[in-house]
Amino acid sequence: MRGPLVVDASVALSWCLTDEQAAYGAAVLGALATTYAVVPAIWPFEIANTLVVAERRRRVTQEQMDSYFDLLRSLSIYVERRESVWICQAAIALARKHRLTAYDAAYLDLAHREGLRLATLDQNLREAARELGVFTAEF
């Protein structure tokens, strides 16, 4: 075990959306058999929103979503509990500095603040992590 990870929605959603599956996402999922993930408070809503949109576009069925939620429940994923105003202020500052969305900046902030590796499929977020000195999870 190499320690806990911050897993962003791009990775977690690759476990459900068959057209977005990636070897990297599978490797992160495998790593969660021996470690745990910490995610910012926005994570469940980002997951839910993407699935709602995917369902509308017929990219995912209710059965697939049910299986996916069963998978998520089986994993050690902990949602960070922090005051939302504090999270927003930190995310805005990082989003400005690294030209990220506020959502992506929340993952970067959490990884930086807690000294955790960041698991993401997003190249812009990977680059911002490198610039900030945050290690990304490599498999």
Image (spheres, grey):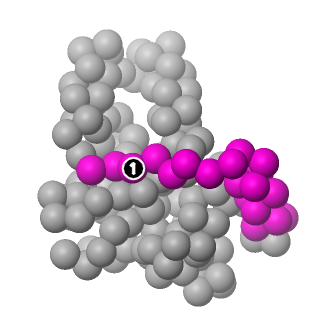
Q: Residue at x 64, y 56 (%)?
A: 106
Q: Residue at x 15, y 58 (%)?
A: 33
Which residues are drawn in magenta?
A: 76-96
The residue sitting at 55% across, 32% down in the picture is 45
Residue 79, visible in the rendered structure: yes
Q: Secondary structure at mark 1?
A: strand
User: For residue 74, what is the image quadrant?
Assistant: top left
Q: Which residue is mark 1?
A: 78
- Is 110 on the left or on the right of 60, as rendered? right
Q: Residues within 10 Å of mark 1 (few under 14, many from 20)?
A: few
Task: Assign the N terminus to one quadrant of the image.
Answer: bottom left
- The answer to if 88 sits in the magenta stretch is yes
The image position of residue 69, as x and y in percent, is: 29, 28
Q: Quadrant of residue 3?
A: bottom left
The residue under label 1 is which amino acid type? Tyr
When the figure is inspected, residue 134 is found, relative to residue 111, above or below; the finding is below
Where residue 131 sits in the image (x, y, percent)?
65, 84
